[in-house]
Image (cartoon, rainbow, N blue to C red):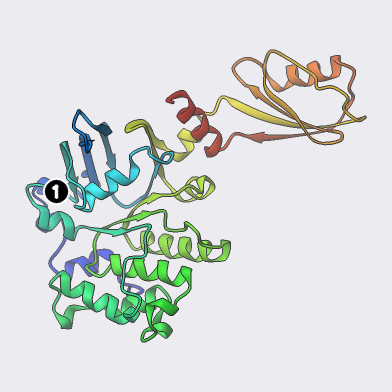
Amino acid sequence: MVRGRGLAYRLASRGFTREATSPKCAGMTSTSAPAISIRDLKKRYAPAGGGEGKLALKGVSFDVPEGGIFGLLGPNGAGKSTLINIMAGLVRKTSGSIDIWGFDIDRDQRNAKRSIGIVPQEIVFDPFFTPYEVLEIQAGLYGIAKHLRRSEELLRAVHLADKRDAYARTLSGGMKRRLLIAKALVHQPPVLVLDEPTAGVDVELRRQLWELVTEMNREGVTIVLTTHYLEEAEELCDRIAIINHGELIANKPTRELVGMAREKILVLTLDRDLTELPSHPGFVKCETSGERILEITYDKDRANAGEILSAVQAQGFSIVDVTTREADLEDVFVSLTSQAA
């Protein structure tokens, strides 16, 4: 990526802008059309022995706004990978529609594929190719002329220029992840999907990957992210959708989604050791995290902090210190997915 030249420049240099190419976007401003639009998407896998088979996606509909970082979350087996594989053209949908950058994946498959880059969970390149060769081969598959290829530029962007001629098998796990990102960006797509990009990566490499992702987003790339690290999704994503059992159960701006939490947490330091736990109808959970430390999770619709403190004091305890903690995305995620179970 050339610093100082954003995504709009790089796409325009190939004659590939939304306004110039998308049939849906004629006469629209760039903010009026989503980067991805999914409508009533269904996928049923046929069983080996006949019968109806498993319905992996049950009429999912949502839009991914252009220019943001969109989180797609859900438990294992929720349908996230199926949805991504349909967008990537690896799995055929049963019904419904997906538009990527204004192009229907069935009616205009070529332009839809040109509009999206997929970074898979799996390492998908030959270990005996060098990073430069991996990118050159990928560029060839997209029919990019040699004088238009940006393999060197991409290697610099993902901090692999010094590994240009090393065998891919000699790269560390984090380097391989960065090479996957570079590979997905070879054709300069306006939308990038990252499927569990930090799985199995240590804390420092996770930080480096997220710095790279946020830099790409600042340059104008729309990011779709799946991750099991919910604290990362909460920090990075502008908007989050949650899928469970093939159904969309939430799709809101991140702050609004976190605000759905009904529970709050009080951490109390008491004047003496606990021999028994206090109780109150508003308690969701009451547990010790030390000899004199009590952590109470309560339903804010059934009680307030004052009532909780009074309940503890009424049972003979004096409170030395109080700290509070708001519920986070993980609390909301667990609540929503358990309700839908």
Instruction: Pick out the residue farthest to the front.
Output: 49
Q: Secondary structure at mark 1?
A: loop
**Left-right relation of 179 to 102:** right
Q: Residues within 10 Å of mark 1 (few under 14, many from 20)?
A: some
Q: Quadrant of residue 178?
A: bottom left
Is residue 263 toward the left or the right of residue 174 in the image?
A: right
Query: Residue 269's x, y, as percent?
Result: 84, 33
Amino acid on which disc 1 is placed: Ile
Q: Is residue 269 above or below residue 169?
A: above
Is residue 65 at all visible to an observer of this figure?
no
Left or right relative to 108: residue 191 = right
| Picture layout, residue 97 above or below residue 236 | above
Q: Which residue in the protein does label 1 denote?
A: 105
Percent of width and height locating residue 32: 22, 43
Q: Quadrant of residue 45?
A: top left
Q: What residue sits 26% from the left and 32% below the top?
A: 55
Quadrant in which the N terminus appears: bottom left
